[in-house]
Image (cartoon, rainbow, N blue to C red):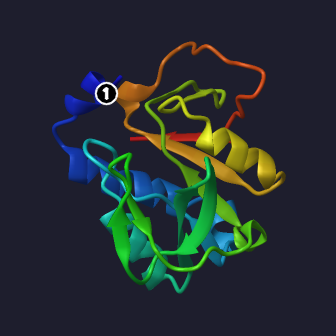
């Protein structure tokens, strides 16, 4: 799926289209605190997403991995590259209860919300820790597949948005 994602040639245009589709969701519109992610490599470009969230007067929250779990942090302030190669905020951790909407990355998704991540289960544990908080998985249309293996601990996303 990493190779498939590398074939996306209009990466920035389709990333902006993804964020427009996210912006049209009522759950996103209702949220003042949006948990996003910092795109890396061939993932959707999140700079336009972060700019959009900020321009709409919402707070951008980003994940940082600590002790095998995602903690929520504000996006403003110092960032550092993690051992996974992900840009992470260095500010203080916030209570997960501040999160009102989560945008979830992935290597592949099915239309009914199954998600293939990078195998460490960070998002599965995080989403399980904030039940009832609306979320959406995002990907390029090439990353949509018919089936994915699911383990008992895997958490489906509420919806999948692709462009």
Residue 134 lies left or right of residue 147; in this view the side is: right
The x and y percentages for residue 112 are 66, 27
Q: In this view, which residue lies farthest toward the front?
A: 67
Would you identify the image quadrant in which residue 97 lies?
bottom right
Would you identify the image quadrant in which residue 76 lies?
bottom left
Q: Residue at x 38, y 41 (%)?
A: 163
In this view of the protein, can residue 159 be seen by the observer? no
The residue singled out by tag 1 in the image is 2
The x and y percentages for residue 129 are 79, 52
Up the image or down, 8 lies above or below 28; here it is above
Residue 123 lies left or right of residue 133; in this view the side is: left
Position of the N terminus by quadrant: top left
The x and y percentages for residue 66 are 58, 57
Q: Residue at x 46, y 74 (%)?
A: 90
59 vs 119, nearest the viewer = 119
Q: Residue at x 57, y 72 (%)?
A: 73
**Total label count?**
1
Q: In this view, which residue lies farthest toward the right?
A: 132
In this view of the protein, can residue 87 be seen by the observer? yes
Residue neighbourhood size for the residue with mark 1, other residues' Cα within 10 Å, grouped as few (<14), some (14–19), many (≥20): few
Up the image or down, 73 lies above or below 55; here it is above
User: Element at badge 1?
Assistant: helix
Residue 154 lies left or right of residue 84; in this view the side is: right
The x and y percentages for residue 149 are 61, 13
């Amino acid at each position: 799926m990493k190779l498939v994602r590398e074939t996306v040639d209009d990466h920035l245009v389709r990333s902006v289209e993804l964020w427009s589709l996210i912006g049209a969701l009522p759950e996103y519109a209702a949220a003042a605190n949006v948990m996003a992610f910092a795109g890396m490599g061939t993932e959707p470009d999140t700079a336009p997403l972060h700019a959009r969230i900020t321009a709409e007067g919402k707070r951008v929250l980003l994940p940082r991995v600590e002790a095998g779990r995602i903690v929520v942090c504000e996006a403003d302030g110092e960032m550092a590259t993690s051992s996974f190669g992900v840009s992470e905020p260095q500010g203080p951790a916030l209570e997960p209860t501040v999160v009102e909407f989560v945008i979830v990355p992935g290597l592949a998704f099915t239309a009914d919300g199954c998600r293939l991540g990078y195998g460490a289960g960070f998002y599965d544990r995080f989403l399980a820790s904030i039940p009832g908080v609306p979320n959406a998985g995002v990907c390029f249309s090439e990353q949509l597949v018919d089936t994915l293996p699911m383990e008992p601990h895997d958490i489906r996303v509420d919806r999948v948005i692709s462009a």
